[in-house]
Image: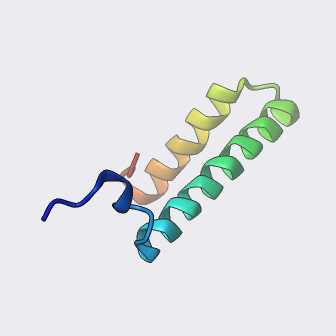
Amino acid sequence: MAIKRDDRIHGNNVAESLSKMLGQMQWERDRLALWLELATGETREEALDNVRSDFRERYSKSYL
C-alpha cells in the first residue's frame, strides 16, 4: 500500500510537531537576522553566515 504524499506530514503527530518547530525556528532566525542587521550594520546574509559559523565552531558540524 503506497502512502499518499499529503499523509507523510498531516496525520503524523511527530512529523507535524517537527514541521511546526522548524517553521518557528526559521521565523525566529529571520527576526534575529533582521535585528542583527539593524544593530550591527551587517547585511542579513552576513549576520546569518556569522551565526552559522559560530554554530559550526561550537559543535564542529552543521545540520544544514
Looking at the image, residue 37 lies above or below residue 4: above
* Residue plotted at (61% across, 48% down): 26
Looking at the image, residue 21 lies above or below residue 49: below
* Residue plotted at (36% across, 61% down): 7
Looking at the image, residue 61 lies above or below residue 51: below
Q: Quadrant of the N terminus?
A: bottom left
Residue 38 position, x and y percent, is 86, 32
Left or right: 33, with 46 as reference point: right
* Residue plotted at (65% across, 57% down): 24
Residue 49 position, x and y percent, is 56, 34
Residue 17 position, x and y percent, is 52, 70
| Quadrant in which residue 31 is drawn | top right
Q: State how many labels appear.
A: 0
Question: Which residue lies most toward the bottom here?
Answer: 13
* Residue plotted at (40% across, 72% down): 12
Looking at the image, residue 12 lies above or below residue 8: below
